[in-house]
Image (cartoon, rainbow, N blue to C red):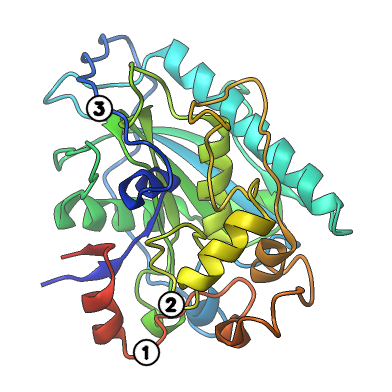
């Protein structure tokens, strides 16, 4: 039986009462079009050891990092990515990366995030035909078969050629699922050791909580990408062991615009023209943009934070059982 802790997307905040819950809508299948050649079947290489056993494939935001986009097609149900849909996600990824760079610069850090910008034949853009079936929906509890397949796929795409081309072995993956769901990130935890080395965001085409059929927002993309670098969820129900009710209440009062608290606009809607959020000093500390934060003395659990590193906050078994974000 496989168990793995998922760092869930902001959409789960709606389940915790911080915003009115919105009804999910059925999403029509996307039409079939000619697609680029799919990625070959996964043939993963063993994960590296050493420092990677602590951080996983993505480390700190101040270090150069490659983000590989993979568009997953579920031919069995006719749910695939059209050219137009891919172009839209590329624009949203660009907006998210630019916003992260602007926020990091406020802390004196220059980011180097390499990502698919829509250039033809980009080595950072792939399509892949799924063997396992997608579930999606508001819970977005994808199957172990799906997670195993994605682990193998990411290991296959993390190549020596990619590392040589961009001069870094820090590689994360943006996996785009062509259905409605609640986006989430599979992050490496220190206790995982060499297991679950490759870190990836699962980004659904549509927001399962939207009142009407709406794509995920650029703020959601930025939120999930920041998870790769160690940013915790700061909303009620967070699975991070040092985020308790007192800290959540504090963040709601002190940093209401922190992107790890909410990705929605003030009225609960998705925003597509900008990202009207911030990386607060607390989040900046968690991802290594700052050496400290004002909250360290007030919230003792933050003493356990290692920038860029997730831990279970106890024995791995206990954390899996206690978390509401367990994939079994």
Give the answer, above or below, for where 225 lies relative to 303.
above
The kind of secondary structure element at disc 3 is loop
Q: Position of residue 279 (x, y in %)?
A: 70, 53
Find numbered disc 2 in the image and state the secondary structure of the residue it sits on. Answer: loop
Residue found 38% across the figure and 67% down from its top: 239
Are dots 1 and 2 in contact, CB under 8 Å?
A: yes
* First of labels 1, 2 by sequence position: 2
| Left or right for 286, reference 223 | right
Residue 36 vs 291, above or below: the answer is above
Q: Is residue 179 visible?
A: yes
Tell me where residue 134 appears, x and y as whole percent: 18, 38
Q: Where is residue 137 shown, x and y percent of the image?
A: 22, 36
Is disc 1 surrounded by few (<14), some (14 to 19) or many (20+) residues within 10 Å?
few
Q: Which residue is mark 1?
A: 314
Looking at the image, is mark 1 or mark 3 nearer the viewer? 3
Q: CA distance from mark 2 to mark 3?
A: 29 Å
Is residue 160 something one can see in this rendering? no
Q: Quadrant of residue 121?
A: top right
Quadrant where the N terminus is found in the figure: bottom left
User: Picture quarter containing residue 164?
Assistant: bottom right
Residue 244 lies, with reference to residue 9, above or below; the image says below
Q: Quadrant of residue 169?
A: bottom right
**Residue at 54% in and 63% down:** 249
Label whose residue precedes the other's in the sequence (2 or 3): 3
């Amino acid at each position: 039986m496989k168990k793995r802790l998922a760092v869930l997307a902001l959409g789960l905040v709606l389940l915790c009462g911080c915003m009115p819950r919105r009804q999910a809508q059925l999403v029509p299948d996307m039409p079939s079009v000619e697609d680029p050649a799919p990625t070959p079947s996964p043939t993963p290489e063993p994960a590296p050891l050493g420092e990677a056993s602590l951080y996983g494939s993505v480390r700190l935001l101040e270090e150069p990092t490659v983000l590989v986009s993979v568009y997953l097609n579920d031919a069995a149900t006719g749910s695939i990515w059209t050219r137009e849909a891919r172009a839209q996600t590329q624009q949203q990824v660009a907006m998210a990366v630019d916003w992260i760079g602007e926020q990091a610069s406020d802390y004196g850090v220059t980011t180097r995030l390499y990502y698919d910008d829509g250039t033809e034949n980009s080595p950072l853009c792939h399509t892949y035909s799924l063997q396992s079936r997608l579930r999606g929906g508001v819970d977005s509890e994808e199957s172990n078969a799906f997670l195993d397949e994605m682990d193998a796929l990411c290991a296959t795409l993390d190549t020596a050629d990619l590392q040589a081309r961009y001069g870094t072995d820090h590689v994360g993956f943006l996996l785009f699922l062509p259905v409605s769901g609640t986006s989430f990130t599979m992050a490496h935890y220190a206790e995982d050791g060499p297991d679950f080395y490759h870190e990836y965001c699962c980004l659904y085409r549509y927001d399962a909580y939207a009142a009407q059929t709406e794509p995920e927002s650029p703020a959601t993309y930025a939120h999930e990408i920041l998870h790769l670098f160690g940013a915790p969820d700061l909303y009620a129900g967070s699975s991070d062991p040092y985020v308790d009710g007192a800290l959540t209440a504090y963040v709601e009062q002190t940093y209401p615009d922190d992107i790890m608290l909410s990705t929605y606009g003030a009225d609960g809607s998705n925003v597509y023209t900008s990202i009207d959020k911030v990386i607060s000093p607390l989040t900046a500390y968690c991802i290594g943009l700052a050496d400290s934060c004002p909250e360290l003395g007030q919230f003792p659990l933050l003493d356990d934070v290692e920038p860029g590193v997730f831990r279970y906050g106890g024995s791995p078994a206990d954390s899996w059982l206690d978390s509401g974000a367990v994939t079994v």
